[in-house]
Structures are given as structure tokens and as C-alpha cells.
Image: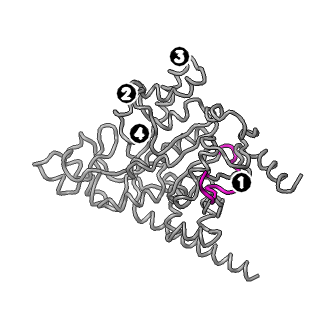
Amino acid sequence: MSQAHASAETATAEALIHLDAVTKVYAGTEAPAVDRLTLDVPEGEILILVGPSGCGKSTTLRLINRMIEPTSGRIVFEGEDVTDVNPDQLRRRIGYVIQQIGLFPHRTIAENIGTVPQLLGWDKTRISGRVDELLEMVGMEPHLYRDRYPKELSGGQAQRVGVARALGADPDVLLMDEPFGAIDPITRDRLQNEFLRLQAELRKTIVFVTHDIDEAIKMGDRIAILGDSSAIAQLDTPERILAQPANEFVEDFLGGGATLKGLNLRRVREIEVAEGYPVIRPDTSREQALAALRSSDEDFLLLLDAEGSPTRWLDEDNITDPATALGASGLPVRVTVEPEDTLADALEFMLQSAHGTACVVDSHGRFDGMIRLETIMGEIASMQRAAREASAERKRKGAS
């Protein structure tokens, strides 16, 4: 047995998915779309494929579940060489989520989610239970959504259904091709957070394609930065790629601001949020509100609704103006951050705020504290110090 083949066999034994020198050449073209790609995906990992347009990352994804056939090479899934097995059987073992979602417009949400379980011969009771379970898992109440049609959903809701459908038969593997690419930034951020929360529970093996390096850093356990024909320029953790780009191509792809990109590695839940911010509720009197504001060091207080969710920013003029009810005064709270948001998300939201702060809310939208701009700037300064120290250490080792 050759050394190369021996190493491939070892990698296959350790990986849930193993691509062994996989090549794809389309008819009528000379240059391969994917050229001798060898890649391992361990069980329970989110592997991100990222690279410039046309580098073959989506082609690689379609090769894994044999939507297209490889020209040469092996695809090993769960220890089995699946290059020659029935591709329909393979695809039923793998969930697939795409940017365009691809819901069947003439079928209800329940029917869409139950597509693969139905093909696998599940009985109606089992399918119905699984549909309700998945809708609840992605934050959609079954009694409200199971009988709707795709045209009745927002873009974010449709994308949630797309994820639920991919999870329908509880596959071990999910393939995701730009799954959040066509959604507005705030909804995209929320869906990313929801998906990471689900992954923490489900521990699926996921291959995720994106063109956005910031999304890759936020979502990936490891990142494969691809060049032409899916050549791997660097395959490593987000932390190590940011700290030690392998070559000029990777540096150019990362672009400037590595420290700011590093904010995608830290979560709101990992830092201390400011507690004790002055808040009032709908039944608070003006006198009580004014006393709460004046006894604090803040210029604004926060009005919460009956459920404890932040609704409006109020200053002293708003509180003392008898012509307008407190619930209609001040400025609305337009953006909030959740524990799973990255510090990069929080910074972006703060820059949209007139207050240089961001409200932290729990999974139910209830107020849980405040993040200040000074906190983020302190984290940036700490990252810059660490980067300088790491650079000095590398230079010292190189000189020795």
C-alpha cells in the first residue's frame, strides 16, 4: 500500500466524510472545477468552505451528496465508499439547505418538512410529530405555521422552514450552500445565532459554503479557504487563520482589519454586561421615572413592556412632557443583541444607536443588561496587544 493511500485510509477511519482526490471536469471545459480535492470532515464539526466566486466551493458541496458525479476520486461517507451506490439513497441520509430555499410552493409547510420522512416510508403519525418537533425547534409555533403555504412566510421564516426540512429525517450530515445569503442583515444574524444554538444541541456534521469571511469566522469550527479548482489555500481554526495566514492569497482574502474580524470569535455571553441600568415599566409614574433617571449616571432610561422587553429610550425632557404618554415618548429601541451574538454584531448595532450602547436580551426578548462601546473598545485593545505579542514571539522564534 502506498504512503498516500495509507494516509487516506487513516483519514477515512477518523472522518465522517472523506473526499479522496475528488475531481470534477465539466463537459466542454479543460480546467477542472474541482481538482484532486482531499478533505476530511470529522463528526460533529461545522466545516466552512469559503473562497472567491467560481472557486468550486458549491460544486464541492454538490459532489458530496452526488447531485453531480465526480469525474474521478472517492467519496467516503460513514466509512463506506459511496461513489458507486444509489445517489438517491445517499441524499436521503444528508440534509441540504440552499440560499433559494427551494420550498415546494403548492405544498403546506408541514408537507414540505415531511418530504424526506415520507419518501422513507414513515407513517403519518410519526411524520406529524416530527414536523411539530422541528417547527418548535426553529422557533415557529406548529399550530400557526404547519398549514400555511410558502408564499405566506417572510424570507426569514421560509429559511427556518428550509432548515427544518433538511433536519426532517434526522440526518447525520447537513450541507448548507449560502443558507443565509439572501436575507437582510438583522434577520441573517438572528438565524445564524439560532442555528448555532441548535448545533450546540444536535451536534450535526455540517459542511457550510459561504463567500463571506466574517460569516465563516462566526460559524465555523474549521475553515477551508479555497483557491482555483477548490485548491485548499489554508485549512484551520478561525483563530489560527486570523493569527497566522498561510500565504499572501489568504491574507488578501481576509482583507484588512484582522483585529475587528477577531470580534467574530467572541460572544456577548463571554463578556460582562453592565447591570443596574435604569429601567421603568408601563405602570411606572412620571415621578418615579424621573427619580430613577436622576439617581443614575445615565442620560436615558429604558422603558420595558409588560413582558420585560425593551421598547423605548427616554430622557428627562420625554419624562417631564405631560403632552405625550411615556409609552409614546422618546426613541424606539430598534436593535438588541442576544447572548449568542458576536462582539462584531454588537459593535455594528452600537454604531446604529444614538446612545453608544446595546440592550442585551435573553432568548425570549427580555432585557438582561447593557453593553457599552467602551467594553468593546477594551476587547479590541486586548486583541491588539495579544496580536503584537504573538507577532513578536514568531519573530523571536524565527531569529533563533
Q: Nearer the viewer, residue 197 or 150?
A: 150
Q: Magenta segment, which residues? A: 26-44
Q: How far apart are labels 3 and 4 at the CA level?
A: 30 Å
- Within 10 Å of the Cα at label 4, are there few (<14), some (14-19), or many (20+) other Cα atoms? few
Residue 73 is covered by the magenta coloring = no
Say which residue label 1 marks.
38
Q: How far apart are labels 1 and 4 at the CA level?
A: 43 Å
Q: How far apart are labels 2 and 3 at the CA level?
A: 19 Å
Say which residue label 3 marks.
125
Amino acid tagged 3: Thr
Mark 2 or mark 3: name the one nearer the start of the chain. 3
Q: How far apart are labels 1 and 3 at the CA level?
A: 42 Å
Residue 358 horizontal side relative to residue 29, left or right: left
Q: Is residue 399 above or below residue 214?
A: below
Amino acid tagged 2: Arg
Q: Nearer the viewer, residue 291 or 265?
A: 265
Residue, far left? 323
Residue 400 horizontal side relative to residue 46, left or right: right
Q: Quadrant of the C terminus?
A: bottom right
Q: Are marks 1 and 4 in contact (CB under 8 Å)?
A: no
Say which residue label 4 marks.
364
Q: Are marks 2 and 3 in contact (CB under 8 Å)?
A: no
Q: Are marks 1 and 2 in contact (CB under 8 Å)?
A: no
Q: Are marks 2 and 4 in contact (CB under 8 Å)?
A: no
The percent position of residue 381, horizontal first and vertical second, equals 50, 71
Q: Are marks 1 and 3 in contact (CB under 8 Å)?
A: no
Tag 1's secondary structure? strand
Q: Is residue 203 visible?
A: no
Residue 74 horizontal side relative to residue 303, left or right: right
